[in-house]
């Protein structure tokens, strides 16, 4: 009985290790919206601001006023760009775009604090 429990624990441990650390697909999922935002967006949008057009921030009120108050609408502008905003569809995967859009919306809800 004890040997079977040890064997079960060992097998489960190996599965957790393989799924959590050994798989590139799983490792890719550890990229968070915050990391993507920091690497791709913070140059112009640090703290939810906008260094090019100060009135088009990523703050909750500005997002709502400009029609970008959902993950879908933020994903659209991240992917395709608009005016001075560059398109990121050739630099980020669809999943990364959705992650960063969700992060932006979450931060806007928290007033970027």
Image: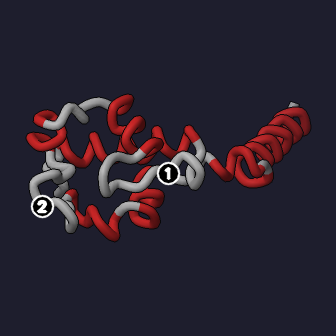
Is residue 59 shown above or below 74? below
Tell me the residue that label 1 is attached to. Answer: 88
- Identify the residue at image location x=33%, y=65%: 42
- Marks 1 & 2, CB-CB < 8 Å contact: no
Which of 76/109 is in front?
A: 76
Q: Quadrant of the N terminus?
A: top right
- Residue 108: % across, % down: 20, 45
Marks 1 and 2, Cα distance to the nearest angstrom?
21 Å
Is residue 38 shown above or below 91? below
Judging from the image, the colouring scheme is secondary structure
- Identify the residue at image location x=80%, y=47%: 18
Q: Quadrant of the C terminus?
A: bottom left
- Residue 67: % across, % down: 20, 31
Is residue 31 shown above or below 1? below
* Quarter where residue 45 is shown: bottom left
Which of 112/93 is in front?
A: 93
Tell me the residue that label 2 is attached to. Answer: 54
**Element type at marker 1?**
loop
**Element type at marker 2?**
loop
* Quarter where residue 106 is shown: top left
Toward the front, the furthest residue is 83
Residue 56 horizontal side relative to residue 76, left or right: left
Q: Residues within 10 Å of mark 2 (few under 14, many from 20)?
A: few
- Residue 56: % across, % down: 16, 51
């Amino acid at each position: 009985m004890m040997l079977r429990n040890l064997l079960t624990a060992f097998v489960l441990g190996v599965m957790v290790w393989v799924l959590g650390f050994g798989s590139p697909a799983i490792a890719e999922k550890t990229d968070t919206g915050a990391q993507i935002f920091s690497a791709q967006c913070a140059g112009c949008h640090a703290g939810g601001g906008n260094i090019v057009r100060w009135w088009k921030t990523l703050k909750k009120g500005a997002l709502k006023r400009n029609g970008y108050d959902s993950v879908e609408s933020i994903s659209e502008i991240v992917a395709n760009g608009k005016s001075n905003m560059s398109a990121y569809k050739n630099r980020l995967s669809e999943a990364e775009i959705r992650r960063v859009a969700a992060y932006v919306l979450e931060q806007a809800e928290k007033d970027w604090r």
